[in-house]
Amino acid sequence: MKERVSALLREKLGRELVLEKPRDRSFGHFATPIAFSLAKELRKSPMIIADELAASFGESEEFSSVEAVKGYLNFRLSENFLSEYASWALENPSEYAKQEKNQKILLEFVSANPTGPLHIGHARGAIYGDTLYRLAKHLGYEIDAEYYINDAGNQIDLLGLSIQLHARENLLDETVEYPESYYRGEYLDGLSRDAMEKFGVEIFHDESRQRELAMWAKDEVMKIIVKDLADTNVHFDTFVYESTLYDDWDRVMQKMATTDAGAIYEKDGKTWIASEAKDDEKDRVVVREDGRPTYLAGDIVYHNQKFERGYEHYINIWGADHHGYIPRVKAAIEYLGYDSSKLEVLLSQMVSLLKDGEPYKMSKRAGNVILMSDIVEEIGADALRYIFASKKSDTALEFDLSEFKKQDSSNPIFYIQYAHARIQTLLSKSTLSSEEIMCADLKNLGDNADTLLFDAMLLPEVVEDAFNSRQVQKLPDYLKALAASLHKFYYDVRMIGTPDEAKLLKVMLVVALSLKTGLSLMGIVAKDKMVKEEI
């Protein structure tokens, strides 16, 4: 709706302009400060310019009024405009709030090590990334979701050792001595039993077969991870394995050296990247004394591969502890001859869990973390998705599980779902046919219904803003506010059996469409029936 109004005004005024929503709805639906930006050019006061522009509109099919107020141009949409847009949205629900951006984006997120199930910290990045992905898809971007599997290095070797020790202690009743660092948790029991069936008990005592065991196990862990993600309605288009990249290291290193002779150098038996010259704190080692590439080397090869695939923009969602990693990766991208500004890194902060006001106790089967699957089992995927999408990802998050188990208005996802279900119940009570409701003319609605209709049709603007700002919490904020308006309207205005029943139910359909579409973009299916307690 805002885009349609902007297009109309661009055509009328012959220039781009900023369109805002007045805080006081009595001033109209939209406003623009264009008169202030024209004041210097036209050598007139903004008030005079605004008066002249307002008078130039005359009668309009799109606007019922255009007024100048203290230099601002205020626009009130006509009933015809609102009615036509509402009818179009209801007749084209699959196209509602969609655009055609036509830009290729590669979005990488989660990328947790395949050494154990996802914990609650991984869940936040997963839901943030998937919601961003859904918003981009809806806006017409050609976007791919990718998971980078860190299946090389010491953490994978440690997985093999951890399974060996777990199996010997728990399946073979042996006394074992654990190193200071090792993986733990109930998932190791399943892996140990499956490994014994596949390889026999000998593999648990053969140190030379740790790598073989680890490479098998990391694929089994990835199955657990993919299932946990799917249970939260998170899916990926592509998976890239770190272990497949190192064969390309020599070519990539030569590529950097060719672009800038000073990019790579040898010192103390190690190979370094001159990242300090590209705003990093210091230069970084990319190949150790023993010839093994570092973790950074794998990331360099991976990002070279990304850029060679020819996307127009790249988004990485990393944990907040990776903040210092950004300059060194961007330095490598510059040395590879690419524009590092095309890589956007978004950070996801840690999560603290409470239960009835007390710190959430870690599961024994999880080892030393809170598993994502445990929380999904306790409060459901919808509640988890809502929680993690409802706060800025780069700020710390603390929430109480007990609040999201309540079936009343204190639980925001229940509150929004009940608004959608309430509309379906209301429609089921009407004797009007769907054709009678759809054909209703949305004129003379009254201020309350007019405001509710306008708010419901702001979803396209919210979707675009949430993606462009990378602040996906704007979508659940909007849905919660719309649900509140719906619940209040339901109690304030009688609809069934009144002369205005058809037009008011049509407004309800628009509200339901925005709620359903918005929830879908959060990976949540809208419910048609629910039991209320305290709405």
Image (cartoon, grey):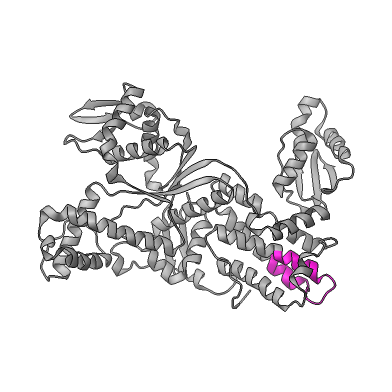
> Is residue 289 shown to the viewer in this render?
yes
- How many numbered badges does the structure rendering display? 0
| 361 in the magenta segment | no
> Is residue 359 shown to the viewer in this render?
no
- The residue shown at (47%, 49%) is 394
Start and end of the magenta stretch? 486-509
Left-right relation of 65 to 489 = right
Is 167 placed above or below 27 here?
A: below
Q: Quadrant of residue 357?
A: bottom left
Closer-to-camera residue (458/368): 458
| 495 in the magenta segment | yes
The secondary structure making up most of the magenta span is: helix
Is 241 placed above or below 424 here?
A: above
- The residue shown at (55%, 48%) is 136
Left-right relation of 330 to 101 = left
Q: Position of residue 428 (x, y in %)?
A: 70, 76
- The residue shown at (50%, 65%) is 382
Q: Position of residue 152 (x, y in %)?
A: 25, 47
Q: Spot the residue most to the top.
A: 261
Q: Quadrant of residue 303?
A: top left
Q: Position of residue 526 (x, y in %)?
A: 58, 67
Left-right relation of 233 to 65 = left
Closer-to-camera residue (475/137): 137
Picture quarter with the C terminus: bottom right
Q: Position of residue 24 (x, y in %)?
A: 76, 52
Closer-to-camera residue (11/67): 11
